């Protein structure tokens, strides 16, 4: 869960990442010394936000099995898609490449090195594991991403306002049928 959701969640929570989580969050209890696929603990809610696109396609089935194994009740999975998400990453690469010297973040290089998740394949793998999709949210507008990116550096009441604005924009755009899905969020029940 890292610092994204943790910046608005006030209770204690566990987080794991391949790389150390920075900046440190006071209510974060890090799970250290174990690869994410080897977690043995169980939790009522497991959030995997912006993780799937960093996992090689051949390892994604194992990732989904791990999510099911460590969750007692709920999983929230969010990822950029293989269509608009990939194009957005290419545009982002262009933005970071214009500096002298270029400062391309490692997360972006990982995005571009992997095949972006295909929502149809993700749904097939999830359903094969008998995970029930409670809600499927498709975000089509890059404004959602921009607001989310701004939200990383904003704390407190403004962070909640930005997240609320994201929700309002997403609801308004859900009525438009011809936009490519940039990001998908799945709420799953185990």
Image: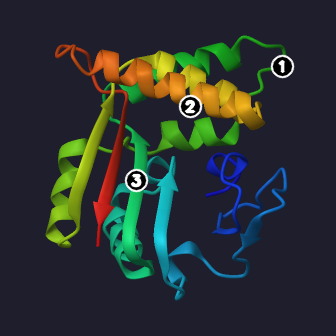
Residue at (30%, 33%) from the top-left corner?
A: 138
Residue where numbered disc 1 is placed? 101
Query: Is disc 1 surrounded by few (<14), some (14 to 19) or many (20+) residues within 10 Å?
Result: few
Quick check: 168 left or right of 159? left
Asked which secondary structure carries label 1, the reply is loop
Q: Nearer the viewer, residue 41 or 98?
A: 41
Q: Earlier in the sequence, mark 3 or mark 2?
A: 3
Q: Measured from the top left, where is residue 48 in percent x and y?
A: 49, 57
Q: Quadrant of residue 62?
A: bottom left
Q: Measured from the top left, where is residue 73 in percent x and y?
A: 36, 73
Q: Is residue 173 visible?
A: yes
Asked which secondary structure carries label 3, the reply is strand
Query: Is disc 2 surrounded by few (<14), some (14 to 19) or many (20+) residues within 10 Å?
Result: some
Q: Residue furthest bottom?
A: 40
The quarter of the rendered structure image containing the C terminus is bottom left
The quarter of the rendered structure image containing the N terminus is bottom right
Q: Earlier in the sequence, mark 1 or mark 3?
A: 3
Instruction: Determine the CA span between mark 1 and mark 3.
Output: 35 Å
Instruction: Determine the CA span between mark 3 and mark 2.
Output: 17 Å
Residue where numbered disc 3 is placed? 77
Mark 3 and mark 1 in contact (Cβ < 8 Å)?
no
Residue at (60%, 35%) from the top-left corner?
A: 108
Asked which secondary structure carries label 2, the reply is helix
Residue where numbered disc 2 is placed? 163
Instruction: Determine the CA span between mark 2 and mark 1.
Output: 33 Å
Q: Measured from the top left, where is residue 174 in percent x and y?
A: 26, 22
Residue at (33%, 23%) from the top-left corner?
A: 171
Residue at (42%, 18%) from the top-left corner?
A: 169
Q: Earlier in the sequence, mark 2 or mark 1?
A: 1
Q: Nearer the viewer, mark 2 or mark 1?
A: 2
């Amino acid at each position: 869960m890292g610092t994204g959701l943790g910046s608005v969640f006030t209770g204690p929570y566990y987080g794991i990442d391949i790389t150390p989580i920075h900046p440190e969050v006071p209510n974060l209890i890090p799970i250290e010394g174990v690869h994410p696929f080897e977690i043995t603990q169980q939790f009522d809610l497991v959030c995997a936000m912006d993780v799937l696109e960093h996992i090689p396609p051949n390892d994604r089935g194992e990732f989904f099995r791990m999510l099911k194994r460590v969750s007692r009740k709920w999983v929230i999975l969010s990822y950029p898609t293989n269509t608009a998400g990939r194009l957005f990453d290419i545009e982002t690469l262009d933005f970071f490449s214009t500096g002298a010297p270029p400062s391309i973040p490692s997360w972006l290089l990982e995005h571009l090195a992997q095949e972006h998740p295909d929502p149809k394949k993700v749904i097939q793998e999830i359903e094969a594991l008998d995970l029930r999709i409670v809600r499927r949210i498709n975000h089509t507008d890059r404004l959602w991403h921009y607001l989310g990116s701004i939200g990383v550096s904003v704390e407190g009441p403004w962070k909640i306002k930005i997240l609320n604005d994201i929700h309002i924009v997403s609801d308004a755009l859900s009525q438009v049928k011809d936009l490519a899905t940039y990001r998908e969020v799945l709420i799953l029940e185990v």
